[in-house]
Amino acid sequence: MKILITGGAGFIGSHTTELFVRDGHDVTVVDNFSTGKLSNLASVKAGIKIVELDICDTEALSIACHDVEVVLHLAAVSSVEKSIMEPLKTHEINTTGTLSVLEAARENKARRVVFASSAAIYGDDPQLPKTESSPVRPLSPYAWHKLTGEFYGRHYHLLHGIEFLALRYFNVYGPRQDPASPYSGALSIFNDRSRRGEALTIFGNGEQTRDFIHVSDIASVNLLAAKAQGSLPEIINVATGRETRIIDVARIIQAGYDNKGEIRFEEGRQGDVRRSYASTNLLAQALGYEPLVKMDQGLLSLRGA
Ligand SMILES: NC(=O)c1ccc[n+]([C@@H]2O[C@H](COP(=O)([O-])OP(=O)(O)OC[C@H]3O[C@@H](n4cnc5c(N)ncnc54)[C@H](O)[C@@H]3O)[C@@H](O)[C@H]2O)c1
């Protein structure tokens, strides 16, 4: 299959690209390297095409999309905080950029667009677990960008017949998540600080929960979503179905390093959700997938990261 992966040099994108290459596909990566790195693709770069461009440049993107069967759209500013601080710039990339990807896919008659959406869309609606039909209550511009992307995708399906699938990833962790970024996932920051014997900072009281899923499981779901034939649901949660408290993850990571550093608590972040975990029934039914990596194994994979 000829596939184009936007954001393929990023954390999720690079693991996904590696898996597509191993599975024998013809991969083009599009990235502007704003957070992604060429070094993330070191193991596969000889066997793929890498095009440096901004997804908002629809003309260039459309050329890169020539003859592509599936577009996997991962490129985004994936930080909630950044979307609050820079709403216009992040809207441009996350919303207009997504529209640009859909346009390029339509122009080139791509069969399917798979879109990296997010659990952030559910916001603080109290219903748990989150199912794909749970109410949506976005708490940040980032969450609105993702929801708008889903609406545009549905529109392109209805109007132009492109198959569209939004994968609502929950909290993804694993190697290559940049701990140097203040916006990175909590787990990579906890891991990095614990390795150095430093104190951990938790925003809020640590009782907030998340459904953490390892990046290798995300890559597997991306591959299945691209390859699946026939009709698929419009939206699928991608998660493990397990609810974990942030304070517990912090303690497990610390214990792994014999770190006696303290855990500090700071005021909760704007737009932070209190509890979150997913129903994974649709993931099992539609794609036949059950996440493989358990939390203890997954945390070990961060050791070498
Ligand atoms: N990491 C998570 O927990 C998580 C959870 C839910 C959804 N997502 C979504 O998954 C996708 C990938 O996230 P990630 O964690 O790998 O982030 P990342 O920052 O590592 O990857 C994003 C990639 O997109 C590229 N990019 C950004 N703006 C671009 C632009 N204008 N043009 C071209 N390329 C651009 C970056 O350089 C980077 O390589 C994002 O859409 C994110 O919103 C991530």
Image (cartoon, helix red, strand yellow):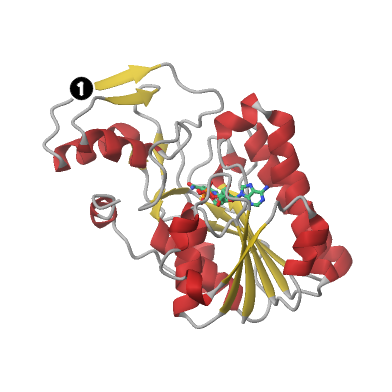
**Which residue reaches farthest right?**
159
- Residue 81, position in %: x, y? 56, 29
Q: Is residue 113 above or below residue 249?
A: below
Query: In screen coordinates, is 123 left or right of 106?
Result: left
**Residue at the spot x=63%, y=27% of the render?**
84
Amino acid type, residue under disc 1 in the picture: Glu
Residue 189 in view here: yes
Query: In screen coordinates, is 107 left or right of 298?
Result: right
Element type at mark 1: loop
**Which residue reaches farthest front?**
46
Q: Is residue 33 above or below residue 269?
A: below
**Residue at the spot x=78%, y=53% of the render?**
57
Query: In screen coordinates, is 82 left or right of 18?
Result: right
- Residue 192, position in %: x, y? 29, 38
Q: Is residue 130 above or below residue 182?
A: below
- Residue 60, position in %: x, y? 78, 60
Closest to the observer, 225 or 175 = 175
Q: Residues within 10 Å of mark 1 (few under 14, many from 20)?
A: few
**Residue at the spot x=41%, y=41% of the render?**
210
Query: In screen coordinates, is 110 left or right of 253?
Result: right
Q: Which residue is mark 1?
A: 262
